[in-house]
Image (cartoon, coloured by chain):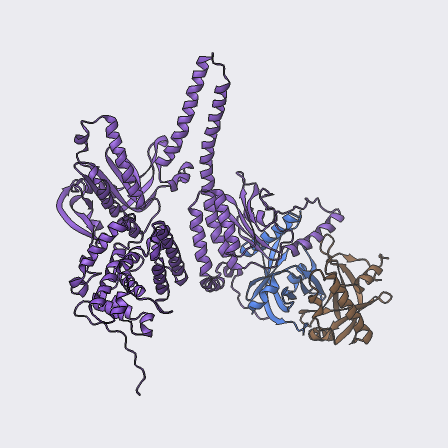
């Protein structure tokens, strides 16, 4: 007999599932919508500590997004012996409270063996085995266990169970099922596993949060009990009464203390981990800010202690609000100084500029409170973050050279200023006006040349946005002033800087307003088509430009700064921004700008490929797109050169269908004097 | 002697398969649809649709060894009959009628589940394959599966 | 060798049929609940209890199976050859976990157990003509 050819080990082929992975990648490319939605679900889950909410989000998503009609989440008991249904969807009357022992059915086995189980013919196999069982019983051959009712569909054919495991603990199991055979495939398995991971962590965190709440409740119960006891005692038993009163007070104080302590000890996001001693030290890239009130000791020497504290606490309150506005966290206060952190406990794309903007805002809004002003020093770098201190007094804290350096920078800062370390220069240069301070010899660091942040770079001085030889620079710089004035007078209620800080679109609204109005004036001045230009209301134009993305504050900064948005993601973002903006307009009574802004979004969704647009929309679109291209932002790489950006405007689909004088004129307005930007000329016929 | 209850079983609404093998001991299987049992001669005549009979036919030409298994589609009750080919010929009119009756009986049994399973099968032409039964085995899954029935002892 | 379109027939929704042959030349025909798709050239059967099928393939490795697609009732004939048996590993685990789930639901835990996964090489595949 001829030798059989060598066959690769089946085990290897199973482990190296390349074909499946390739196919899944292709299918996944088609299913990116689902994955994006899953990412959104994941972030929704991780944003809450409410267990019921997490369960609701997860199961709603099962149904509406992924199309699984019957789903349930079971939680494991502490000893991991029993699974209890915590939430369900698609079952008459719900199944909450039903229990199954670990190892029972597809759900129980998935949980016990901590493996995903996907079966497509459960009912068929059960029927088969039930027959075998009947015959086994009839033959009296073996002692059989009773059959068990599973909590789901009685006639389920397809079942997919995902065990929810965090570290090495079984949290529970997520299951979907269907009466149809083979209803779930590898892709469903993969998608559900991804959601399962998030749900597991979310539930785990929520349960720990619940245990913290439970402790508080226990204190409440003890409180109630003591109160009751107190009430039923006879008045004559004075000593006993006094004892109990003291105990009652003690309990009340402890309860308040534990609640405020929790809030004080760490950023809220890490509290659940902290309570379970599971917060590990981590290395993070952060911005560290130190502040100091100049001459506070002297200033407060004549004051009563409670007046001193009142002043300081007022300052801390205002500073705290500003720091929170820019997504920072006050780590500690030390006398009259604050130490704040940006970029903890989770990384953010904008933490460095957030720190600087917060510092500038603090100087602007609270600096005048003290006669000698404030110093603020900022450094960015890697620190180690975690719980620091003796066990009953530990705080969330950071250590590292970066922290010490920040403290030094603050000490060298001029009064009323905001100083940053030299390593911050490159990162901050695009947006801020920086001034070099005197070189200093600093103990433990060496020679140090810090930078003072004078403020945001003015649009007129930002050569990336405004070419100094352009017509705009020559004739229309005053428009910028007018825009600032209108902003202060009519829209003072909006903090534009903190809005723009979320995606580093600093001065964007002012720039768009300035360009649009300048363009309008130039078109009017140049004489042609006067009727068309006079129909546009300058004030309305300016208002719409300033408010066109006012809804940014309702969108997660992470989404705004996402470099990897695909077409569908960008559309969703645009839609959410528009919705948020329209709502904000209503809130500030600026509804009249809504139609123009909505049209602007419509233009930008297709780059004007669909339909005709009013002059006002064209003016805004030209300005908005131009600034988006030329201003430095996080979600793009380097900004475009001015000439390149203007040429890109000429290439808009809108400008291909017809000659568009607004866009051509805009190029004339902003281009360097020596450049030539011509609209794309299309020949009407080819000559061969 | 094939017990009467098995005769009734084979005549009932069952699905059946015929197993054969070639000179190199390579086995082949095909569907049979309908059968007639002659208890007195211990012979079973199985009606095998011609669409899938080629290998079975050539195997039987080489050696006449036959295995015939009948299965109740819902109950999974099952028996296997092993023996030797006695003859092969085309089915008669009457035998084709038996096949159609069987089709509707099995269809009715599966009506709760999948009647289409049965209605699509091409039964004509079929070959009547007669073999003499040497051994009978219980194939019903569960305890005792694979047990040989003692034909002399059964009533 | 095994095309993608055969996969639905290997989900076990409708039982499959297998014929084996002893060294003495006697064929054996029986139903089996599922033929597992391992890869394009391999399938597996679950070995739960000793049977004639089990004994036969260890003497004479050749077998033929009919698998049936529960959606369109297409039948496929596979000629296969017993290759080896696995008592552990990913294939075994995958089969075992399903068996355990079903057994636990029918009170047969411990009685209905997977002993091994028998792996077969696929020698040929063809669609049946039974449905015209």
Q: Nearer the viewer, residue A576 or C79?
A: A576
Q: Nearer the viewer, residue A650 or A22?
A: A650
Q: Which chain is brown?
A: B
Viewed as shown, does residue A168 lie left or right of C25?
left
Residue B80 can be seen in this image: yes
Q: Residue at x 29, y 52 (%)?
A: A500
Query: Which residue of the protein is positioned furthest toward the top in this rendering?
Result: A236
Residue C119 coordinates in the image, percent (x, y): 59, 61
**Where is residue A605, by image quadrant?**
bottom left
Q: Which chain is purple?
A: A
Residue A131 coordinates in the image, percent (x, y): 71, 53
Q: Which chain is blue?
A: C
Q: Work out which quarter of the rendered image holds the C terminus of chain B and state it.
A: bottom right
Q: Residue at x 39, y 30 (%)?
A: A256
Q: Work out which quarter of the rendered image holds the N terminus of chain B and state it.
A: bottom right
**Where is residue A309, by image quadrant?**
top left
Residue A358 coordinates in the image, percent (x, y): 26, 45
């Amino acid at each position: 007999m001829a030798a059989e050819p060598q066959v690769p080990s089946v085990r290897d082929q199973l482990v190296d599932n390349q074909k499946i992975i390739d196919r899944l990648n292709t299918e996944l490319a088609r299913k990116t919508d689902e994955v994006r939605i899953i990412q959104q679900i994941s972030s929704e889950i991780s944003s809450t500590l409410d267990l019921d909410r997490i369960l609701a989000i997860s199961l709603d998503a099962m149904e509406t997004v992924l199309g699984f009609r019957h789903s349930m989440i079971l939680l494991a008991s502490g000893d991991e012996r029993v699974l209890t249904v915590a939430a369900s969807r698609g079952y008459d009357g719900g199944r909450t409270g039903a229990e199954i022992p670990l190892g029972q059915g597809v759900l129980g086995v998935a949980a016990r063996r901590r493996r995903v189980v996907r079966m497509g013919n459960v009912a068929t196999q059960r029927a088969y085995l039930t027959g075998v069982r009947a015959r086994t019983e009839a033959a009296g051959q073996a002692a059989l266990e009773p059959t068990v009712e599973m909590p789901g569909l009685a006639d389920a054919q397809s079942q997919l169970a995902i065990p929810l495991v965090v570290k090495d603990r079984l949290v529970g199991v997520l299951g979907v099922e269907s009466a149809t055979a083979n209803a779930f495939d590898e892709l469903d398995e993969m998608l559900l596993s991804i959601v399962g991971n998030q749900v597991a962590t979310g539930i785990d965190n929520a349960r720990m949060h619940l245990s913290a709440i439970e402790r508080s409740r226990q204190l409440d119960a003890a409180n109630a009990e003591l109160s009751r006891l107190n009430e039923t005692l006879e008045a004559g038993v004075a000593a006993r009464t006094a004892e109990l009163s003291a105990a009652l007070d003690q309990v009340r104080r402890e309860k308040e203390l534990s609640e405020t302590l929790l809030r004080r000890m760490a950023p809220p996001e890490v509290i659940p981990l902290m309570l379970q001693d599971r917060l590990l030290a981590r290395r993070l890239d952060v911005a560290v800010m130190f502040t100091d009130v100049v001459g506070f000791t002297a200033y407060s020497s004549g004051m009563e202690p409670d007046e001193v504290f009142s002043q300081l606490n007022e300052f801390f309150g205002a500073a705290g609000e500003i720091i929170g506005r820019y997504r920072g966290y006050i780590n500690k206060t030390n006398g009259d100084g604050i130490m704040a952190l940006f970029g903890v406990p989770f990384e953010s794309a904008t933490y460095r500029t957030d720190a600087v903007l917060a510092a500038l805002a603090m100087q602007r809004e609270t600096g005048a409170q003290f006669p000698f002003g404030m110093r603020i020093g900022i450094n960015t770098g890697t620190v180690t973050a975690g719980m620091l201190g003796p066990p009953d007094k530990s705080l969330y804290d950071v250590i590292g050279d970066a922290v010490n350096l920040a403290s030094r920078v603050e000490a060298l800062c001029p009064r009323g200023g905001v100083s940053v370390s030299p390593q911050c220069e490159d990162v901050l240069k695009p947006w801020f006006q920086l001034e070099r301070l005197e070189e200093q010899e600093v103990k433990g660091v060496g020679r140090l040349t810090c930078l003072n942040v004078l403020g945001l770079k003015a649009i007129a001085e930002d050569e990336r946005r405004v070419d100094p030889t352009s017509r705009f620079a020559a004739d229309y710089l005053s428009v910028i002033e007018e825009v600032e004035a209108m902003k202060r007078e009519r829209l003072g209620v909006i903090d534009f800087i903190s809005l723009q800080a979320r995606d580093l679109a600093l001065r964007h609204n002012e720039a768009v307003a300035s360009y649009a109005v300048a363009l309008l004036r130039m078109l009017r001045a140049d004489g042609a088509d006067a009727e068309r230009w006079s129909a546009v209301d300058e004030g309305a134009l300016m208002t719409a430009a300033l408010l066109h993305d006012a809804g940014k504050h309702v969108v997660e900064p992470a989404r705004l700064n996402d470099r990897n948005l695909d077409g569908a993601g960008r559309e969703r973002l645009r839609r959410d921004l528009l919705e948020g903006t329209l709502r904000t307009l209503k809130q500030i009574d600026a509804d009249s700008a809504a139609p123009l802004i909505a049209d602007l979004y419509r233009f930008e969704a297709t780059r004007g490929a669909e339909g005709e647009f009013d002059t006002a929309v064209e003016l805004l679109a030209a300005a908005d797109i131009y600034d988006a291209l030329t201003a430095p932002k996080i979600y793009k790489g380097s900004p475009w050169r001015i000439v390149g950006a203007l040429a890109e405007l000429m290439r808009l689909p809108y400008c291909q269908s017809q000659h568009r004088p607004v866009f051509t004129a805009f190029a004339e307005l902003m281009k360097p004097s020596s450049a030539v930007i011509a609209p794309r000329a299309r020949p009407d016929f080819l000559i061969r | 002697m094939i017990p009467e209850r098995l005769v009734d079983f084979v005549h009932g609404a069952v699905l059946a398969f015929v197993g054969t093998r070639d000179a190199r001991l390579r086995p082949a299987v095909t569907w049979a649809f309908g059968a007639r049992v002659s208890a007195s001669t211990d012979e079973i005549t199985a009606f095998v649709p011609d669409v899938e009979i080629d290998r079975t036919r050539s195997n039987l030409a080489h050696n006449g060894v036959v295995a015939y298994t009948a299965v109740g589609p819902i109950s999974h009750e099952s028996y296997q009959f092993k023996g030797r080919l006695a003859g092969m010929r085309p089915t008669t009119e009457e035998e084709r009628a038996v096949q159609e009756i069987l089709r509707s009986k099995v269809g009715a049994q599966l009506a709760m589940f999948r009647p289409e399973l049965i209605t699509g099968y091409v039964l004509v032409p079929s070959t009547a394959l007669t073999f003499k039964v040497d051994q009978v085995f219980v194939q019903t899954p569960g305890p005792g599966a694979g047990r040989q029935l003692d034909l002399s002892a059964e009533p | 060798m095994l095309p993608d379109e055969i996969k639905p027939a290997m989900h076990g929704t409708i039982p499959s049929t297998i014929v084996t042959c002893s060294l003495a030349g006697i064929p054996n025909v029986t139903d089996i609940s599922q033929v597992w798709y391992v890869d394009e050239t391999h399938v597996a059967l679950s070995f739960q209890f000793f049977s004639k099928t089990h004994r036969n393939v260890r003497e004479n490795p050749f077998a033929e199976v009919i698998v049936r697609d529960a959606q369109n009732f297409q039948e496929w004939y596979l000629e296969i050859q017993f290759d080896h048996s696995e008592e552990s590993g990913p294939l075994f685990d995958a089969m075992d976990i399903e068996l355990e789930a079903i057994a636990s639901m029918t009170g047969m835990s411990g009685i209905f157990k997977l002993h091994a996964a028998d792996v077969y090489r696929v020698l040929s595949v063809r669609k049946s003509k039974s449905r015209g």
